Image (cartoon, helix red, strand yellow):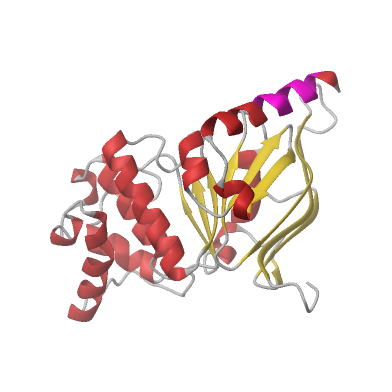
Amino acid sequence: MGEGDRSTLKLAGIWKTFHAGTANERSALCGVDLALSEGDFAVVIGSNGAGKSTLLNVVSGEIVPDRGSVTIAGENVSLAPVHRRAGWVARVFQDPTQGTAAGLTVEENLAVAYKRGQARGLSYAMTGRRRRLFAEALEPLGLGLEARLQTQVELLSGGQRQALSLVMACLRHPKVLVLDEHCAALDPRTAEAVMTATIRAVESSRITTLMITHNMQHAIDCGNRLVMMRDGRIVYEADGAEKANLTVDALVERFHLTDDKALLV
């Protein structure tokens, strides 16, 4: 990374092809370049198969790109597996059950998250100070989880588990937060509570964030950057005043325009 480059997350020339050399060959990412500074909140949209999830998996380390580099806070992590990136990257999945351990209590899950990226054994020693820290992190959700620290997570609703996953992801202020349609499986009321909590956490801690959504209103309301993908490429980006002035109708029109152009290629 150059001396003047202040990007927290930088993707340079990312290519990824699945089943190369077979009849099922599919190019998922085609030369993707993306740079996000500290505190940038980029919302990624696109139709199914556009490359959104592959992009997030490359950032989190689930997938190693065929070509290109992934740099986080100045360090090239292109070949680093998920566990090596745990100190830099946190992720919230669409499925509320993926981000939490059902057999542990709320506070035990938070204790695991608190030690993310550090050497840890099986001890979850709980102090009064740490309990207060956990309760203070949960209280803004408005779901009453701060009073249920000793409740088994398997007894929580899907929305409560997803809210807990978000708090766990943000607890240690990661360099990069990856949100994979994290509100898609929730009821509308809980989805809004989790989205509000997401915005608050990202803004207060200035966490560089990538969020996939199919909700056009969320794409407009959330974040300061918008990235539209199609066929493994970024086909449209908006930030600043351009993003602030977007409407759902304009975004849908832009979305269909890229589809129409692709059909002419």
**Residue at horizontal 42%, vertical 60%?**
169
Residue 147 placement: quadrant: bottom left
Q: In which quarter of the image is the C terminus?
A: top right
Residue 158 placement: quadrant: top left
Residue 139 horizontal side relative to residue 27, left or right: left
- Residue closer to the observer: 18 or 89: 89
**Residue at horizontal 18%, vertical 61%?**
146
Q: Give the range drawn in magenta.
A: 256-263
- Residue closer to the observer: 224 or 3: 224
* Predominant SS along the magenta part: helix
- Asked if residue 258 lies in the magenta stretch, the reply is yes
The picture places residue 136, in percent across and down from the top left corner, at: 24, 69
**Residue at horizontal 41%, vertical 73%?**
120
The picture places residue 93, in percent across and down from the top left corner, at: 45, 45
Residue 129 horizontal side relative to residue 213, left or right: left
Residue 261 placement: quadrant: top right
- Residue closer to the observer: 97 or 183: 183
